Amino acid sequence: MKKPWGLVVVTVVVGAIGLGLIRILSRKEEMENLRKLFGDDWFEREVLGAHPEHWLGKWHQKREDNPITKYTNDLVGYALQGDSLRCDVKRLATKLQGEFVDTLAELGYAVFLVNEGAEVTMEPMAPLAGPDLRVGKERKEYFVEIRRVRLDEAHAAADLATEDVFEKLCKTPSRHSVVISMTDEYAAHSPKLKKAVRLVRGILENLEAKGVEKATLYYHGPNDYSVREGIETQAAYDYSDGKRLGDQVRDEEWKRKAGFVARFDDTGRKKERTGVDVLALGEDRIEIKPDETYLRLRTLLGKKQKQLPKSAPGIIVLDISDLGKLMVDEFTIARTLYGDLVVVLGAGAEGYPHDLQRKPNGYFMKTTRVSAVVIQETTSLGGTVQIKRQVFPTNNPNAQVLTRDELKLFGAIAEGLDNLCAEAL
């Protein structure tokens, strides 16, 4: 009777070892492109090592089958093949080692264009400064600049006050994340900051109990604050009622002058720690929010267009993935690109009839070099990397206006903007 049990044990052990070898070999195959690009020494140290410094290694330590590693490996495979995607492989390796996230955004968009049937060259003018990509399709050429908008570009570096907020709030169990904007007067460990954070903690509990998904706290002091539940929208001014209009204008000014603002967003499930981001508010009110972010985006776009040649249509890709929780929506993007909305009142008619028009102060009206801007957002869901790309065509008639098919090469045309294709002009 002992032999059968021995055979069972041996079979189980051999099976376990075999399964382990299969897993090891399959993982090696899954990352073969990365190993080939970076070389064995760097790959073993920074991806598979015990104390990696590179993002790929940190993700691998957290979860061996993480989607970022697989996504990067797949993209690198296109570069190594060198067919429709041409690049300096050694330079690509160096950039991925040093500027991983930014370079991954460039490589990802290049592969996307290749899959759309284009031929792509990365850094076509290197070592000279120039566009990130040269794109060719159906005997036409385009140049592309790609820019990832970082959260830390829109606010000051973390200081003691930020660390104080993190320490007080991060340990609080909650189903909401919080984005806090505050002025320098809310100094670290100050009574003023402690009172504001104590209120935030209470609001977190209240929102969960009431089932509220989104809310905003405007705080001037312990006896002068307001919690606005729901999604914030632009104020719909009531021009037919003078008293109500005055109250609306005063309320908007009161919100604007708040020195401490907290935005709450339901994450979908309760967590042991509250996710917190802290931004700084200075005298110039530099803060990421829908009614001011457009100015920052216009500045970034203005800088990037300088990299684009004038000889061919230019495309700028803005990756705003880092700004997702800060309410950067299509309204903000439209304001950035096409100008501020203004109300034009009709004269002599009862009820103050009005129309909405855009000022000619949008980004597109300041350049003929850019034919479209692509807004890109990246998420990781269900074990895969998912990317949403929306194309916003220029409304400048003096620029090189693209056809509908040309625009679709770079992503999905934003809803309601088909009228800006060349066929519609």
Image (spheres, grey):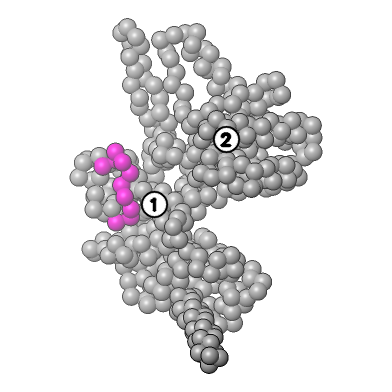
Relative to 11, does residue 295 appear above or below in the rendering?
above
204 with respect to 365 (left or right)? right
Relative to 200, does residue 99 appear above or below in the rendering?
below
Given the image, on which type of amino acid does mark 2 rest? Answer: Glu
The location of residue 238, given as percent across then percent down, is 43, 15
State which region is magenta.
409-418
What is the secondary structure assignment of the residue under circle 1?
A: strand
Viewer-side residue, 381 vs 130: 381
* Principal secondary structure, stretch drawn in magenta: loop
Disc number placed over residue 208 in the picture, else none: 2
Q: Mark 1 points at which residue?
A: 388
Residue 417: in magenta span: yes
348 with respect to 332 (left or right)? left
Which mark lies nearer to you, 1 or 2? 2
User: Residue lying furthest bottom in this view?
Assistant: 3
Q: Residue at x 45, y 61 (%)?
A: 383
* Crowdedness near tag 1: few (<14), some (14–19) or many (≥20) residues, C-alpha within 10 Å: some
The location of residue 96, given as percent across then percent down, is 53, 68
